[in-house]
Image: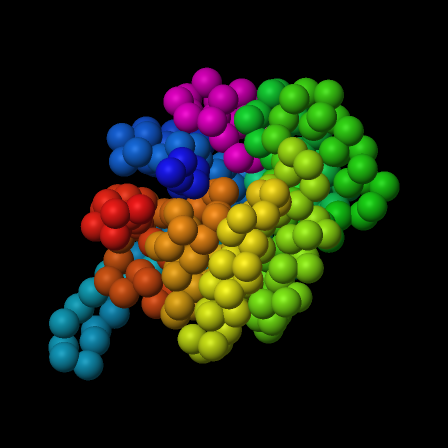
Amino acid sequence: MTGPKVCVSLDGTTVKAMADEAARANLAGADMVEVRFDRLYLKKPEPVEVEGEDGEVKRVLAPEEEWPVRELDEVDVDEAIAALKESIPLPVVFTVRPKAEGGHYPGDEKDRVAVLEKAIASGVSRIDLELSIDEDTRSSLLSQAEKGNISVISSIHNITTTPSAEELVKMVEEHAQEGQIFKFCGTVNDHQDALQIIEASHDLRNSKHAFSLMALGNGGDWTRLHAPVLGQDLVYATLRSEYKLSNKGLVNVRDLKNAWTLLEY
């Protein structure tokens, strides 16, 4: 069967770091990468030494929500987009996630939309347009993307209460328009939540709709691991490999590919 595409979401906070990650994602077999442009406004701090209960000292990073944030004018948008386009060998999903949906962009919505418009004008492969964007503004962005022959991912994020399987199916049927992929990424609080996403994907597996359903939290990676038999069109993976990554609902791109081989998908 034709498997889903794999997109590695880049964690870098500089253009160079993102370019280096994209090169590694390419070697790991990713089909595309997600440029989280909003992460360029984060300042990655130095790790601090923390002593554990066993007396072992480890170097750990503070949670991302505690990282310093750059001012808007510290990032030259045009220069950064041009440099990313030149240095990344894979197709790009361009994303500027707002804080309301778990992102880091520090400006207002007008500024954020201007960045999205510049990305569309640059000819990115895909653009992530949240469904929370003002209807008129989103229609304009969709029109610009269509003229540029740019694929659209219509997304919903940062949902802390997992909808039922029936509600998720309705979301896909409503928002997975022709030529668009509907992406849902929520947070699971227990395995019952995770099963709702599995059930919805299973019900949609033979539909005409293109979708990518997942969640953060323990069990949120189930639809990623079983995407080939659940009809998912796009799976998001990471280059991260820390211990118990799966508890966060994330999966390393190499581990994902190995799992699919092991399960004979």
- Residue 112 visible? The answer is no
Residue found at the far left of this picture: 55
Residue 225 point in image, percent of width and height: 35, 55
Residue found at the far front of this picture: 206
- Figure colour scheme: rainbow
Residue 48: within the magenta? no
Residue 6 point in image, percent of width and height: 40, 40
Residue 170 point in image, percent of width and height: 68, 59
- Residue 164 visible? The answer is yes
Residue 87: within the magenta? yes
Characterize the magenta stretch by its predominant secondary structure: helix
Question: Could you tell whether 166 is left or right of 52 in the image?
Answer: right
Residue found at the far right of this picture: 136
Residue 189 point in image, percent of width and height: 48, 76
Identity of the residue drawn at 68% across and 36% down: 178
Q: Which quarter shows the N terminus?
A: top left
Residue found at the far top of this picture: 86
Q: Which residues are magenta?
A: 77-94
Question: Could you tell whether 183 is left or right of 51 in the image?
Answer: right
